[in-house]
Image: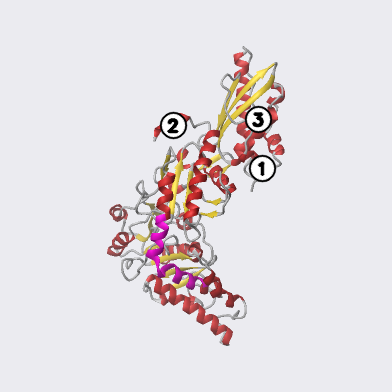
Amino acid sequence: MYNKKVMDHFMNPRNVGEIEDADGVGEAGNPHGDQMKIFLKIRDNRIEDVKFKTFGCAAAIASSSMATELIKGKTLEEAWELTNEAVAEALEGLPPGKLECSVVSRQATHRAINDYRKKQGLEPLKEQT
Amino acid sequence: MGENRFVYMDHAATTFIKPEVVETMLPFLKEHFGNPSSLYSIGREGKEAVETAREKLAKALGADPDEIYFTSGGTESDNWAVKGTAFTRRKKGKHIITTPIEHHAVLYPCEYLETQGFDVTYLPVDTYGLVDPAKLEAAIREDTILISVMYANNEMGTIEPISEIGKVAREHDIPFHTDAVQAIGNIPLDLQGKDKDVDMLSLSAHKFYGPKGIGALYIREGTEIDNYMHGGAQERGRRAGTENVAGIAGMGKAIELATVKIEEHSKKIKKMRDRLMAGILEIPSCRLNGHPEKRLSGNLNFSFEYIEGESLLLMLDQMGICSSTGSACSSGSLDPSHVLSAIGVPPEIAQGSLRLTLGDANSEEDIDYVLEVLPEVVGKLRAISPFYKPASVCEK
């Protein structure tokens, strides 16, 4: 049901872990469902390093891994624009009903960016739902 | 991790077909293709094979051959028993008693019957999944027309007190159906002895090393039940349709092989199972679901905290291990199994459930391999999980 790329990111997820002195931390999930926690290290408005932890199905884990790959090195504005469709596309497709499993990575990223903004004394951006 | 093996530990889902069974089937897929209803020789050979298989099933169950009806499998047998009894007895009452841990092949016909004016009691089970015969008796009403309780549960392997439940049903003169799909080949059955109060029993060949698409419903002589398929005179007119001769012949051979040395076989499987169970329970924050002793000899069902079942299953599959989980993820929300929910396993723990069912495909080397791979895979998923804190290691 999952393609090779998804299986690769599921079996060997990139950027797993935590950042102790993270500049922004975000968590998102569904009650009794997927849960993702993301840690950002930010320098000069750019995501210098990113780590994550995810509880969920293979699609959720692979999407988390791919999302972190896609936002690494990007500016915060670019990272904010990340969509689940872009994550799914980078994974060369997710099975029907599994696209929603990638939603948590976008939500967690948004929350981590807003966490950083708050720490900087900036107004948090409005999350899209 | 070690060298990849292929380890099949999903015998409750289906089993491989034994070579002797395939041999028994082949002539009816080749030269003996005749219709058992035809009078010429290749038809008569088919008819003979069907009746020989019927005798083998009857012998294995302690039944009369006239009480065996061939169907397409467990689902059809369950549907026939539940709906066929309900509709034929609807003038006597509209109440059915079953349990929340039945297979969907019993639960969904019951839900359908609710839309048709029937009233169903889903009798709660205890934390091991056991039905209490006293509570069952208390649930009986004047208008109760059917009791259906599975012989052994497909997910967690718990074996129900079928003799006691049957006794209650008989005393109240209520027909009693049991889905014995998981029991055949694991537990010795005797419909004239300890199981004498069972009126209907479902079975499916592919769970005991026979082919898929064939099963049977045992209907005790004198049981009121509607005919299921209307058409030709096959199965004494009660389940019409040209017989699946090869399947029936294969099932006859399979049940003979599965029941001839059943106690010896169960003992061998249980020995491997118990070693695997002890090894897996060494993993921290892990619990066994179902009854520790009153369970099918090949069944293991665990919940691993902090991880999700589909991930666990897929990672094991990558290591060559075939397993099963009660957890299903759809659109980011996880549906825990109805069976684990019914025994009170909290959803966040039920999500990390894993079923391993042993059988004839397994060897002691398989146990070694799973014990080597599983703790590593669980550890790997926990390392990714935001819920897991290394401190939980000490919790056990």
Give the camera-side residue of B118 and B243.
B243
Apparent side of residue A54 relative to residue B149 in the rendered image (left or right): right
**Magenta stretch, residue numbers:** B250-271
User: How far across and down, in percent of the image, does residue B168 sit?
Assistant: 29, 60
Question: Of callouts 3 and 1, which one flags the residue occurring earlier in the amino acid sequence?
Answer: 3
Disc 3 marks a residue whose amino acid type is Thr
Residue B100 visible in the picture: no
Magenta region includes residue B268: yes
The residue that disc 1 covers is A94
The image quadrant where one finds the C terminus of chain B is top left
The residue carrying mark 3 is: A68
**Residue B202 appears in the figure:** yes
| Front tag of 2 and 1 | 2
Q: Label 2's element?
A: helix
Q: Main secondary structure of the magenta part?
A: helix
Q: Amino acid at mark 2?
A: Ser
**SS category of the residue bearing label 1:** loop
The residue carrying mark 2 is: B392
